[in-house]
């Protein structure tokens, strides 16, 4: 009688231990040291927090819930942590930024959808739930990004983009070495990254091969975005339209006659059947009304 | 000689109810006051918006739409009794035809209004006609319901013409304007062979054409659901399923009306136990048909148990809607069938009780068709308050739902007060036929 309960207890204890093990495993993000110590160049205040709240509500709320309310989506595995919790708040600003950039399994990467500035806004909002938080501002000057010149040339022969980045410092041009560059093509619902994010070489250059099967518009035009991130100069991006895609000319879904289209573009068969119904009905009513007219005339007062 | 007396007695008997008496005034007073209360609830809804209802993003079709389906359903009975039964030469149904037509017209006329009550911005109603898309079942529904209403009105009116003349001639203490209206509406009826033939032809044409139109109104109403891919609605038998259900609801409504008119208007000689027996059999027949569709409707998805269907069926059979579901299926369909198969139950009073059960069951059935499906959409419901996805009607909503029911009762009451609810001319003709056969 006693034995099974004991066994059960030990099983329970064991599974608890496993859970905790996973928990602690899940909690460590192994953020590289140089990322961990990064700080925001934006001063966190009420305005940044409220901008961050809007971004949070649009991008994070569905999983993490309202901070402090515990309504995070418990049906996911792992459970998205409650971000106002001590555990999450113990992460440094740099770690939070890193997590947003990289993501992990269920937690999406926001690298391509949120700018660094917006990520800082979200972090500013999250820090509002931590009374003990004191911000350390980074000495980084965002206006330095204005000095950066980012050039992306498409090389037809190589079918690749040659990207050159340098900064126009007072003492002349300075190649940006080891900065992250990435290439995107604008699609209807967001940006499609081409190849991986690369680092610029010693002369501030990077080469990204461009696939030749990306559908463009009628003339094959694509909108290409090059993004650069440098620890000292911040974020820079350039956009250009180039005819390097596959020309595609598919009529829009709302151009042909279809069930889902507007009345003027209703399918003929529906127009026919509907009108047939209505016209037959009208003929029938006219017939009856005419009978009534004859009826009235034929009777004597 | 005796025949003359007979027809005079019939005329007197059937015209007797057409006068203002105290009972009528009290009943109208009660109806009007209740209607005012309900309309006040509707005013609140207009003023504050749909937020006063239990409707939301997930359950955007609630009681109002169930009510609408119920109304369209009940209106179908005109076609069954006056159309189908008369074409099948079921003579016993003749005295009930007008009651059925009045019920049909009243429900069809109010059904459109029920939809307007479901609208957050009824002032934009005209947009349906200006910008309506022929591809949308909603537009077809508007079209067929309007058509059915017109046809039902004609179906009530044309056989009524001779009786209107009788009213104009025989009703003594009515104001002159009322007599003028009867006179005008009777279109110079003078019982000539040409006129008889015209009435016969027109009634027959309508009796035939009302069948496709009535099938269309309820089939199209069912398509409002079945043309989506949601669990519980995505079914190919929804059209006939709705039509069969409509016959059940309508027949029950007619039985209740028969009972009440028989009592209040003292029509025991004209609506006899024989009629109750017959229409009781009719109710069994249509209920069995409906039961058959019910079995099919739940059996097929329950055998396959596709994910969404499985959830839906689970909710209905043992889940949060189970109580309502079993009350509806047992109390509104299965028990009535069992009872009505037994002859002793096909008597006026038991049938009144059974029909009331069936009618309530019919209303609940519409609720069960509309709401549970709405409560579980395909996309996961995330981070919204529970009340968004679980539907609980509010008091205002309930009152606004009752309003159209009162309107139907008002229309039936008024129509049954100004026209003879049993066809006088036809009854006399029928008597004469019997008499001449005897000779």
Image (tube, rainbow, N blue to C red):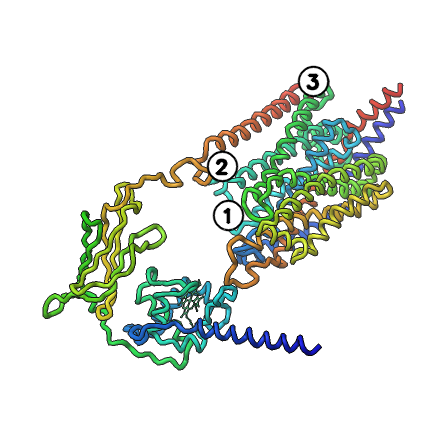
Mark 1 highlights which residue?
B123
Mark 2 highlights which residue?
B134
Residue drawn 83% across and 45% down? B349
Residue B321, image x, y percentages: 66, 56
Residue in front for this viewpoint, B391 or B295: B295
Report the side of B173 relative to B227 (left or right). Answer: right
Q: Earlier in the sequence, mark 2 or mark 1?
A: 1
Report the side of A64 relative to B266 (left or right). Answer: left
Residue drawn 35% across and 38% down? A251
Residue B386, image x, y percentages: 56, 63
Q: Report in which chain the residue with disc 2 lies.
A: B
**Residue occupying the far front of the picture:** A3
In the rendered image, the quadrant that contains the C terminus of chain A is top right
Q: Report in which chain the residue with disc 3 lies.
A: B
Mark 3 highlights which residue?
B194
Residue drawn 67% across and 42% down? B296
Q: How many circles with numbers are drawn on the protein?
A: 3
Q: Earlier in the sequence, mark 3 or mark 2?
A: 2
């Amino acid at each position: 009688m006693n034995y099974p309960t004991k066994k059960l207890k030990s099983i329970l204890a064991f599974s608890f231990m496993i859970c905790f093990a996973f928990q602690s495993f899940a909690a460590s993000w192994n953020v590289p040291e140089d990322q961990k110590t990064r700080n925001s160049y934006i001063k966190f205040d009420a305005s940044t927090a409220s901008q961050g709240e809007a971004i949070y509500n649009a991008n994070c709320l569905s999983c993490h819930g309202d901070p402090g309310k515990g309504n995070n989506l418990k049906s996911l595995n792992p459970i998205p942590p409650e971000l106002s919790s001590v555990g999450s708040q113990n992460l440094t600003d740099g770690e939070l930024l890193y997590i947003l950039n990289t993501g992990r399994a269920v937690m999406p990467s926001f690298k391509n959808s949120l700018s660094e500035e917006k990520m800082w806004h979200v972090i500013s909002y999250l820090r509002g739930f931590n009374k003990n938080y004191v911000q350390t501002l980074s000495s980084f000057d965002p206006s330095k990004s204005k000095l950066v010149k980012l050039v992306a040339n498409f090389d037809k022969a190589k079918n690749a983009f040659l990207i050159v980045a340098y900064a126009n410092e007072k003492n002349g041009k300075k190649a940006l070495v080891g900065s992250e560059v990435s290439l995107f093509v604008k699609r209807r619902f967001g940006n499609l990254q081409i190849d991986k994010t690369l680092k610029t070489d010693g002369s501030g250059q990077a080469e990204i091969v461009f696939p030749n099967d990306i559908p463009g518009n009628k003339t094959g035009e694509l909108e290409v975005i090059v993004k650069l991130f440098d620890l000292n100069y911040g974020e820079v991006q350039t956009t250009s339209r180039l005819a390097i895609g596959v020309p595609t000319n598919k009529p829009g879904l709302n151009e042909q006659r279809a069930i889902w289209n507007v009345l003027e573009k209703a399918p003929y068969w529906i127009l026919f059947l509907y009108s047939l119904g209505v016209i037959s009905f009208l003929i029938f009513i006219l017939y009856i009304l005419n009978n009534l007219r004859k009826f009235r005339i034929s009777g004597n007062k | 000689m005796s025949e003359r007396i007979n027809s005079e007695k019939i005329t007197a008997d059937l015209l007797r109810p057409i006068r203002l008496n105290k009972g009528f005034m009290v009943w109208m007073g009660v109806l009007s006051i209740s209607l005012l209360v309900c309309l006040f609830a509707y005013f609140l809804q207009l003023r504050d918006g749909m937020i006063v209802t239990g409707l939301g993003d997930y359950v955007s079709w609630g009681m109002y739409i169930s009510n609408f389906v119920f109304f369209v359903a009940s209106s179908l009975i005109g076609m069954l009794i006056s159309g189908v039964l008369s074409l099948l030469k079921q003579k016993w149904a003749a005295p009930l035809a007008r009651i059925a037509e009045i019920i049909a017209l009243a429900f069809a006329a109010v059904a459109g209004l029920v939809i307007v009550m479901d609208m957050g911005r009824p002032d934009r109603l005209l947009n349906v006609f200006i910008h309506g898309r022929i591809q949308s079942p909603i537009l077809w529904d508007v079209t067929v319901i309007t058509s059915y209403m017109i046809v039902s009105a004609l179906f009530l009116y044309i056989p009524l013409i001779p009786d209107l003349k009788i009213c104009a001639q025989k009703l003594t203490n009515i104001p002159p304007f009322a007599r003028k209206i009867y006179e005008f509406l009777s279109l110079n009826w003078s019982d000539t062979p040409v006129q008889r033939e015209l009435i016969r032809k027109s009634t027959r044409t309508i009796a035939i054409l009302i069948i496709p139109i009535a099938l269309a109104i309820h089939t199209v109403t069912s398509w409002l659901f079945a043309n989506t891919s949601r669990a519980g609605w995505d079914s190919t038998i929804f059209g006939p399923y709705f039509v069969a259900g409509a016959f059940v609801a309508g027949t029950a409504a007619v039985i209740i009306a028969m009972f009440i008119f028989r009592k209040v208007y003292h029509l025991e000689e004209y609506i006899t136990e024989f009629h109750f027996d017959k229409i009781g059999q009719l109710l069994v027949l249509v209920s069995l048909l409906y039961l058959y569709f019910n079995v099919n409707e739940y059996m097929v998805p329950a055998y396959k148990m596709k994910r969404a269907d499985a959830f839906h069926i689970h909710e209905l059979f043992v889940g949060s809607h189970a109580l309502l579901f079993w009350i509806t299926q047992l109390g509104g369909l299965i028990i009535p069938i069992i009872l009505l198969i037994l002859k002793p139950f096909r008597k006026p009073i038991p049938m009144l009780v059974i029909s009331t059960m069936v009618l309530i069951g019919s209303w609940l059935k519409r609720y069960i068709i509309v709401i549970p499906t709405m409560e579980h959409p395909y996309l996961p419901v995330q981070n919204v308050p529970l009340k968004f996805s679980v539907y609980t009607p509010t008091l205002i909503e309930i009152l606004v739902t009752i309003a159209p029911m009162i309107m139907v009762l008002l229309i039936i009451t008024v129509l049954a007060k100004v026209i003879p609810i049993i066809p006088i001319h036809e009854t006399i003709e029928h008597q004469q036929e019997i008499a001449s056969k005897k000779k």
